[in-house]
Amino acid sequence: MTALQALRKYHGSLAGKTVFVPAGLSGTGLFACQLAKNVFHAGKVITTVSTAKIPKLKELLGENTVDQIIDYTKSEPRDVIEYGSVDFLFDTVGLAMQYLCLMRPGSSRIISVATLPSGNQLQDSSLMDLPHRPAIPIPFRLGLNMLDQVRKLRARRYGVEYSYMFLASTGKDLDELRRYVEEGRLRTVVGTVVEFRDIESVRNACDVVYSGKGGLGKLVIRVDKSENLS
């Protein structure tokens, strides 16, 4: 759902455009690559993976989903991708500012889910939607606002629009994704399944997700309904 909402934020159609999704086999990146190609009809999809994951990419996402695969352990995307050629960057690894030189001046857009939100975004997000409606301390909020403005100004110097995005959970988007799966346009990839009762395995699996390295697809934590949790 995060990938779907991010791709929608491009101004205009992505058909025939170049989309760059770092970490193409991450829990979010694998959906972004497929949606970009199979739903939004991007002309070129570029992604990064480690050496060990390269053979798995076409097997898991489909033969023609990704057009350019970069082994990030051997090459920097900035050394491989043509400068000024990317129309849309879905930043899942927090390196949006490093890739500004790759963006097409004047019309490109970066959506990040891996940098930091502005203080105002965080205050208005579902994370703060609690019964007591907590308020972010003003100095912290202003600091986040300033950092967000710095990133936007840096992007603007390259003629690029940058913004951070929070997921907005909706049943409508979930139904749309289900339809894409049924139509064969979207594949789900479960990389790790751990039992909830095995707290050490849960902790280790979450550490892999948090680090952003070594994981593959989605993490599933299975709760055994037969267990007596009372």
Image (cartoon, rainbow, N blue to C red):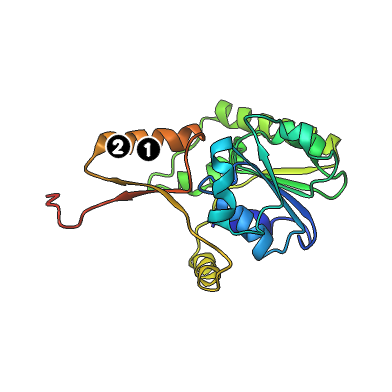
Q: Amino acid at mark 1?
A: Ala
Q: In the figure, is residue 127 to the left or right of 13?
A: left
Q: What's the CA distance linking mark 2 and mark 1?
A: 6 Å
Q: Name the residue at the front extreme.
A: 55
Q: Quadrant of residue 93?
A: top right
Percent across and percent down for residue 74 are 66, 29
Quarter of the figure that contains the N terminus: bottom right
- Numbered badge on residue 205: 1
User: In the displayed structure, would residue 106 be above or below residue 204?
Assistant: below
228 relative position to 119: left or right: left
The x and y percentages for residue 2 are: 56, 53
How many other residues sit within 10 Å of disc 2, few (<14), some (14-19) or many (≥20)?
some
Residue occupying image coordinates x 59% and y 43%: 54
Drawn side of residue 44 relative to residue 144, left or right: right
* Residue indicated by mark 2: 201
Q: Is residue 158 or residue 178 the one in the foreground?
A: 178
Closer to the camera, 126 or 47?
Answer: 47
Please state the horizontal and vertical placement of residue 5, each as a whole percent of the image.
61, 57
* 146 relative to 198, above or below: above
User: Considering depth in this image, is 12 or 64 the residue closer to the camera?
Assistant: 64
Q: Could one spot residue 155 in this view of the protein?
A: no
Q: Do labels 2 and 1 touch, CB within 8 Å? A: yes
Element assignment for label 1: helix
How packed mark 1 is, by other alpha carbons closer than 10 Å (few <14, some 14-19, many 20 or more), is some
Residue 189: x %, y % from top left: 47, 54
Q: Which mark is residue 67?
A: none
Residue drawn at x 62%, y 60% is 35
Disc 2, SS:
helix
Q: Residue at x 55, y 42 (%)?
A: 53
Q: Amino acid at mark 2?
A: Ser
